[in-house]
Image (tube, grey):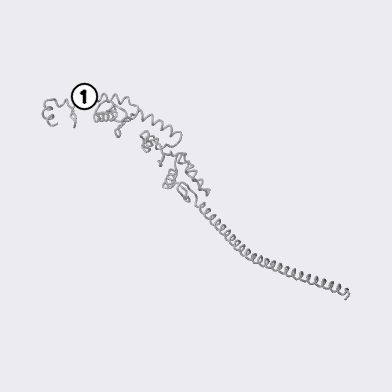
Amino acid sequence: ASFIKDRVLSLVDDDALVIRQNSIHTQTHAMRVERRVLGALRACTQPVSIVQLAGRHGLEADMVAAAVQRFVSDGEILGKLQAGTFTPRSYVDAQSSRVDDFFSANQYLPLSLLRSVGLEARDWARTKNVEGVSLSTAFLAAQLLETARSSITEAVAMDSWADVQLLLPPSLTSEDAAELLQHFADQKQLPPNAVILHRVIMSNSFVKGVASNFDAETKSVAQCLMVTQSTTRGGKKSAGGGGGVVDDSGASKKKGKRGARSKKGRGEEDDDDDGDRDVAARGGGSGGGKPE
């Protein structure tokens, strides 16, 4: 490199050369590269990478990047060069029109939609002069915010509660609802008696009523349990007493059976005695009738 610089370039007109770190080319070559880059960029309708553009046309990426930067700065090409990618203005305008139509119809914008066209919510809102607030996943217009805040205020005024997520578009998450409530609280746009629980807001009176009902229900359940336990214990005692009666009754029944058997035995013995007596009497009578 030093040999070429000292021995060769000294013999050539320096004004006609463009010397870079690893390359040397003439002004004519540089102008030809710029014209080719200019024509390629004017034909672009979508974002294109500088590396891909250079590789497709067989050009050096450094020369292409320098040419694109100069064209954008001078206004010869409408668009922007960011992170090695050129995005034409026509593409941005088309996507911006789609974003504008969506916002006009829904009064909110998903942040994913803005990022897909290379826009930030804050920059877009400032450009369009739109008022609103950015949440976790979406940008909400001031009109939609006011509608949600009115419903919240009405619910709190009636000593009731409200799930803020139900007041927002279905695509928004519970984190968006919680963030919106926190935004209202920071801006002091909520009633003073409001109580926030993540995405749910309720009045202080409603909380006290729930607590009071819970206490009453707890006492009622406790009393029912006490009555049930008392009844169970009383039933066990009655069951133990009945066993004794049964035992006594069984014993009496057994005793009665034994008495019946005794009486039956005595009756049989009496019958035997009577039979013996009858036999003896008959025997005596017969003997007395015989002649000696």
Identify the residue shown where x is 17% and y is 26%. 17
Q: Quadrant of residue 171?
A: top left
Residue 106 percent location from the top left of the image: 46, 35
Residue 9 percent location from the top left of the image: 13, 27
Quadrant position of the C terminus in the picture: bottom right
Residue 10 percent location from the top left of the image: 11, 27
Horizontally, is 152 left or right of 257 in the view? left
Quadrant position of the N terminus in the picture: top left
Residues 235 and 215: in front is 235
Q: Quadrant of residue 140?
A: top left
> Quick one: which residue is furthest to the bottom in this view?
292
Horizontally, is 10 left or right of 147 in the view? left
- Circle 1 sits in a helix, a strand or a loop, which is it? helix
Residues 229 and 170: in front is 229
What residue type is disc 1 on?
Answer: His
Q: Quadrant of residue 288?
A: bottom right
Residues 187 and 209: in front is 209
Mark 1 — residue? Answer: 29
Residue 236 percent location from the top left of the image: 61, 63
Residues 204 and 42: in front is 42
